Image: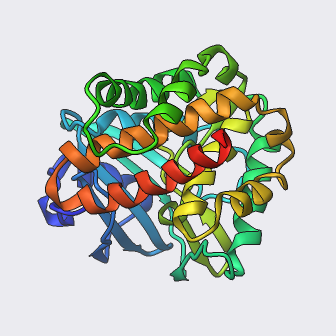
Amino acid sequence: MTGYGWDNLPGEVRDAVEAECGLIRHATSVPGGLTGGTALRLETSHGPVFLKALPEDSPSAPLYQRERLVGAVLPEGVPAPRMLWSGHTSGWIALMFEHEAVEREVDLRPTSPDLDDAMDIVRVLGETLTPNPGADVPPVADNVEFLRRRADALLAAPPEDLQSLPAYRAARAGLDLDELTGNTLLHADFHEGNLLATDRGVRLIDWGLACQGAAWVETALLVPRLILAGHSPEQAEALAEQVPAWKAAPEAAVTGLAAMWSLCREYVARNGPAPIRASRARAAAAGQAWVEYRSS
């Protein structure tokens, strides 16, 4: 998330931020993210805060709007930075959060001690965010629609080298979106890139894809990330079994969602921007392995 420093923000935005937290003594850009806005550590007289902001006409602005809605109602029991303030001025959306002292990157590989913390967070999300505490976010079907368009485009004209085509088609046919509905607030983008290892433990960030649906969907969207991190499909599902909500997951819906997740990444690996094709190809391979495991 780069491109704008503190001094590059509109004066009205800087004034609004300082009206909330006091004079900014120093601002440091924080790398990461793909939304094209700005991410800053701001030193104030009361200590550091984290600010993210972008123009309201940015393609990523709806993600900030979702995060703002979630931040306003997120219960204290969820291990995530608190949103301290949000503003919408001079054509910009700005979100201010507690600053987290990051100690290292989170690791979800099979031998990592972070796995227990990550699975604990998934359990806490299902328990604490059911029912939805009041975030006016879209239904999970909207998120899946994003996956479906790309998946169906690939299935309509499959490349000759697309593997597991029969399994993908069978999984796609068995997906009933009604089985994904529910009253749980979902993060829906749970992976190591959205986890911070801090002096307060592992914390979950970036709620831009938050939606409402069945509690088990959170775990289902994590499983291919675990496979990507080096777990076998069997090992990843064994971890999923630790989450109570997973036990209610309909078999066909899980397999269908796995297929949509994998095919979307396969589509981007073939047609997306060159810099991300390789990473999406690796993700697609992880999803494919899961679909094959569930289809065998």
Residue 216 visible in the current orientation: yes
Residue in front for this viewpoint, 31 or 114 = 114
Where 74 falls versus 25 (above or below)? above
Residue in front for this viewpoint, 114 or 13 = 114
Whether residue 207 sits left or right of residue 108 in the image: it is left
Location of residue 291 by image quarter:
top right
Location of residue 296 by image quarter:
top right
Whether residue 187 sits left or right of residue 5 in the image: it is right
How many circles with numbers are drawn on the protein? 0
Where 229 falls versus 138 (above or below)? below
Location of residue 282 by image quarter:
bottom left
* Rendered residue at 15%/65% (across/down): 7
* Rendered residue at 66%/27% (across/down): 253
> x%, y% of residue 103?
55, 85
Residue in front for this viewpoint, 60 or 44 = 60
Residue in front for this viewpoint, 208 or 225 = 225
* Rendered residue at 57%/33% (across/down): 257
Residue 84 visible in the current orientation: no
Where 274 falls versus 137 (above or below)? below
> x%, y% of residue 28?
29, 76
What is the residue that sits farthest to the bottom in this orientation? 103
